[in-house]
Image (cartoon, rainbow, N blue to C red):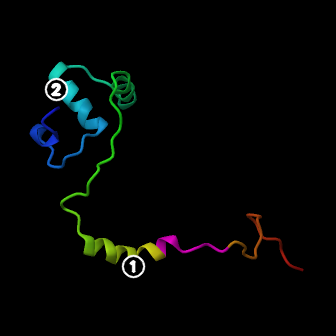
Amino acid sequence: MDVGPAASGWSDQCWTLARIAEIVRRRFGVEYTLASLDLLLHRIGWSVHVPSRKATERDEAKIAAWKDEQWPVIKRRRRAWAPGSASRTRQARA
């Protein structure tokens, strides 16, 4: 695993638990659940790492456009109070 995911057939440079489990299965013939593999990796001193640099495929213009167009729609605040009833059935009015 020292050579990276690309040497094992994955085009991006990201190791995931599923990929590590696949490599362990291929090389040693042992299958682990993702939870047990995570526990095993922590026991031998491995930890989760976040990339320190940005991906080379990153498109800053598309990111800026998404933030301007899509994010406000997603982030739009909900009304704190709305008239209505919590009952699933409506009471008949006389």
Q: Is residue 38 above or below residue 78?
A: above
**Image disc number at residue 68:** 1
Q: CA distance from mark 2 to mark 1?
A: 45 Å
SS under mark 1: helix
* Comparing labels 2 and 1, the label whose residue is closer to the camera: 1
Quarter of the image for residue 8 reads top left
**Which kind of residue does numbered mark 2 sit on?**
Arg
Q: Is residue 82 magenta?
A: no
Rendered location of residue 29, percent (x, y): 19, 19
Q: Is residue 1 above or below residue 54?
A: above
Rendered location of residue 51, percent (x, y): 29, 49
Image quadrant in which the N terminus is located: top left
Task: Name the residue rendered at 29%, 50% in the picture.
Answer: 52
On the question of residue 77 being in view, the answer is yes
Q: Is residue 10 above or below residue 68?
A: above
**Which kind of residue does numbered mark 1 sit on?**
Asp
- Residue at label 2? 26
Residue furthest to the front in view is 52
Left or right: 78 as drawn, with respect to 43: right
SS under mark 2: helix
- Find the magenta span and give its range: 73-79
Q: Camera-side residue: 88 or 60?
A: 60
